[in-house]
Amino acid sequence: MTDSMGEGHHLSAAAAFDSLGADYERAFAHSAAHHASLQRLLADLAPGSRVLDVGSGTGRPTAQTLADAGHEVLGVDVSPVMTEIAARQVPGAVFRCADIRTMPPAGADAEEEGFDAVCAYFSLLQMSREDQSRLLRGLGRSLRPGGHLVVATVPLDVEDVGVVFMGRPVRVTSFGAEEFTALVVEAGFSVQWEQNSLFTPAHPAGEPEPQLFLHCRRL
Ligand SMILES: C[S@@+](CC[C@H](N)C(=O)[O-])C[C@H]1O[C@@H](n2cnc3c(N)ncnc32)[C@H](O)[C@@H]1O
């Protein structure tokens, strides 16, 4: 997501990912850093853990890896097309099409205990800074105390910037790595491990982009 654009028509997250569908998986699912992060999360989880996958995309690699390891996975995605692909590709997990910002904190149902883990791999980038901050706090409330949060982002100091992402005009908001880490800490997490890497999507327009993975625990 490198080309900056002027004002004009930009796609919502739902519209952008509806039009990308499985092309997103082809470009991104081979990320070694993403797979390493998932292996690290698996090592932290007790058998049969309950995991919320925020912005679950096509279900691969995240939900599939966790479900194949025997965990109970709920994926939530705002794109109907991504949700349908995920449900088809990963029958061992449950997927719901919803905007995570408008959902009550999942797991906060009085009948339910919180999730054991929440993942959000690259799913905050089309939210405002305020929404990202509010969501991180809400995700903390949806976790049981001591539960795990894994969050990955593209750590760039940009706010509502127009870019072309895999040929689609979208608006992107993020934080630099230090600022994003501070936001996660302010939301009530301790950061246990972090990885910074560069990743090049397998796409004709793909250029190396920085990626930040944070593995955290709810305090
Ligand atoms: C960059 S993709 C990442 C997909 C997946 N997490 C992965 O790493 O393969 C971001 C995903 O988050 C979803 N998303 C973006 N904003 C969302 C929101 N407000 N609520 C739920 N899903 C959202 C998009 O539809 C898309 O499928």
Image (cartoon, helix red, strand yellow):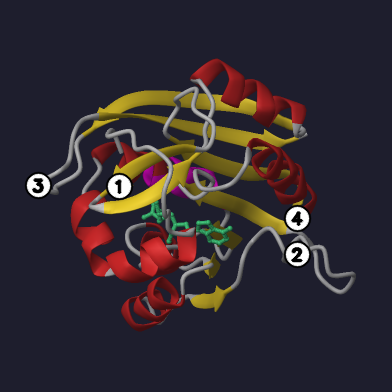
Mark 2 crowd level (few <14, some 14–19, many ≥20, 10 Å Cα): many
Q: Nearer the viewer, residue 146 or 57?
A: 57
User: Which amino acid does the dot numbered 3 rest on?
Assistant: Pro
Residue furthest right as drawn: 110
Mark 1 crowd level (few <14, some 14–19, many ≥20, 10 Å Cα): some
Q: Which mark is residue 142?
A: 4
Residue found at x 61% / y 26%: 191
Residue found at x 44% / y 61%: 66
Answer whether labels 1 and 2 touch (C-beta < 8 Å).
no
Under tag 2, what secondary structure?
loop
Frontmost of labels 1 and 2 is 1
User: Which amino acid does the dot numbered 1 rest on?
Assistant: Phe
Q: Which mark is residue 204?
A: 3
User: Which amino acid does the dot numbered 2 rest on?
Assistant: Gly
Answer whether labels 4 and 2 touch (C-beta < 8 Å).
yes
Under tag 4, what secondary structure?
helix
- In the picture provided, is 132 more to the left or to the right than 111? left
* Residue wearing tag 2: 107
**In terms of sequence position, does the residue under pointer 3 or pointer 2 come before the other?**
2
Spatial separation of the CA atoms under disc 1 and disc 4: 31 Å
Spatial separation of the CA atoms under disc 3 and disc 2: 40 Å
* Residue wearing tag 1: 165
Ligand 1 closer than 8 Å to the CB at disc 3? no
The answer to whether residue 29 is visible is no
**Magenta region, residue range:** 38-45
Spatial separation of the CA atoms under disc 4 and disc 2: 5 Å
Under tag 3, what secondary structure?
loop
Q: Nearer the viewer, residue 30 or 28?
A: 28
Ligand 1 closer than 8 Å to the CB at disc 4? no
Q: Quadrant of residue 99?
A: bottom right
- In the picture provided, is 135 more to the left or to the right than 163? right
